[in-house]
Amino acid sequence: MKKDSNSLDDIKLIRKMMEESTRFLSLSGLSGVFAGVAAIIGALVAYLFFLDNGTINYSEYLSGIVNQSIPATGWPLIIDAFGVLLLAVTFALFFSIKKAKRDGKKFLTPISSRMLLNLFIPLLTGGVLIIAFILNDLLLLIIPCFLVFYGLALVNAGKFTFGEIFYLGILEIITGLVAAFLPGMGLIFWIFGFGILHIIYGVAMYRRYDK
């Protein structure tokens, strides 16, 4: 019986070593929580300052920008969105590096480099497409584009890390596609996709892997 128990432990150890050699396991659930909070704060900033406490409809605001000067009126909202994305990436790097150090692992490895490459290719592609939307006054499609390409980035990177990342990416893609058909509700989809989904994912990941 003891021999069987030792064999089972050896199998688990081998499986763990193989998993660690093929997947990046230092992603922290806290990064998802903080990214979600940052997204909600960003949406509140847009609501309070750009939409004047909700007295201006989101779609009306963007339609007004098209008829005016985008650099004068539209960039604050766009900068707000990119600021949230930058904060999310910063939180992800900070907490992941911290978790890697805690576990006695290196953050930059061939696997993590491959994961980051697969993550950033769709993100950069989406960023270029968003710039094209801005230049062509297709501002109502910016948030759906953010969500869809962010989701594609997560699906792409999910092959090299926790499986939950893949499913989060699928939910982000679905949220973005629905938002594309309801462009006047972009701010609500932003809060749901980047805020609520991130917080739910982050809490679940923290409870499962970080404790």
Image (tube, helix red, strand yellow):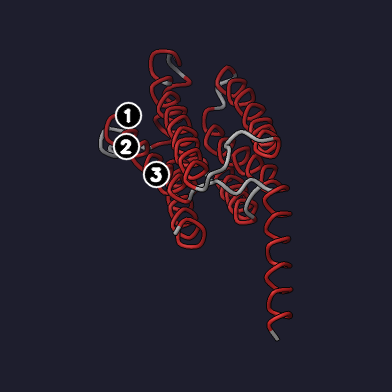
| Crowd band around label 1 with a 10 angstrom C-alpha radius: few (<14), some (14–19), many (20+) | some
Residue at point 62% right, 20% down?
132
For the N terminus, which image quadrant? bottom right
Residue on which disc 3 sits: 34
Residue 53 placement (x, y as % from top left) = 25, 37
Q: Amino acid at mark 3?
A: Phe
Residue at point 39% right, 44% down?
34
Residue 146 placement (x, y as % from top left) = 56, 36
Tag 2 near tag 3, CB within 8 Å: no
Residue 6 placement (x, y as % from top left) = 69, 74
Q: Amino acid at mark 2?
A: Tyr
Residue at point 44% right, 59% down?
211
Tell me the CA gap for discs 3 and 1: 23 Å
Residue 7 placement (x, y as % from top left) = 74, 73
Disc 3 or disc 1, which is closer to the eye? 3
Residue on which disc 1 sits: 50
Tag 1 near tag 2, CB within 8 Å: yes
Q: Which residue appears farthest toward the bottom when viewing the image?
A: 1
Relative to 121, 208 lies left or right: left
